[in-house]
Amino acid sequence: MNPAEPPALDQVIHHPTRLTMMAFLAGCAEAEFAAVRAYCQVSDASVSRIATALEEAGYLKIRKGAVGRRPRTWLSLTQAGRKALKQHLAALQTIADAAEAAGAEAAGADAAGADAAGADAAEAHEPGG
């Protein structure tokens, strides 16, 4: 991966709370609004605002109904939402893998340089050297 051109991250779901909500919903067919709110640990207003933004992007379906006389709202990912989440997570993994490999390569180069410098110093201190 070229660090100057990392894979594209989906800015609609990149925010941590949006990403958390999407990941939570990926684990179920649909979830009640209150369960999403509790899992994400945010206010009703935040869940509502985020759900609306994700729905406008085509990633989320909001279904309203009632249980007895109590109104309820259920949230579910659309196929486009599941695909976007999968692509976003793959892009994050690509970035992480490339950074880890670059770090290991840099550490290897540093270690090789230190080993060479140490060997040169040892030769300089040998008798007759």
Image (spheres, grey):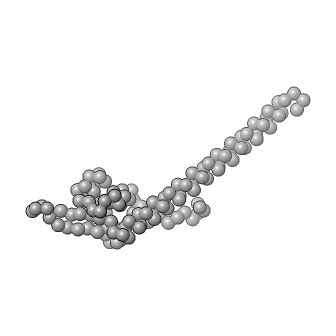
**Residue beneath the point at 10% across and 62% down:** 68
Q: In this view, does 13 lie above or below 39?
A: below
Relative to 86, does residue 42 appear above or below in the rendering? above
Where residue 116 appears, x then y in whole percent?
Answer: 76, 41
Quarter location, residue 27: bottom left
Q: In this view, does 59 lie to the left or right of 129?
A: left
* Labels in figure, total: 0
Horizontally, residue 119 falls left or right of residue 96, namely: right
Image quarter of the C terminus = top right
**Direction from residue 123 to residue 8 in the image, left or right:** left
Q: Quadrant of residue 81?
A: bottom left
Tell which residue pokes out farthest to the right in this image: 128
Is residue 39 something that shows in the picture? Answer: yes
Up the image or down, 37 lies above or below 59; here it is: above
Rendered-image quadrant of the N terminus: bottom right
Residue drawn at x 79%, y 33% is: 122
Query: How far across and how far down the image is residue 56, in percent?
Result: 32, 72
Q: Which residue is drawn at 53% across and 59% down?
A: 94
Q: Which of 69 and 113 is in front in this view?
A: 69
Q: Position of residue 38 (x, y in %)?
A: 26, 52
Q: Residue furthest top?
A: 127
Nearest the viewer among 119 and 28 is: 28
In percent of width and height, residue 86 lies at: 43, 63
What residue appears at the point 29 percent right and 52 percent down from the top-left corner? 39
Tell me if residue 11 can be seen: no
Along the line of sight, the residue nearer the viewer: 61 or 109: 61
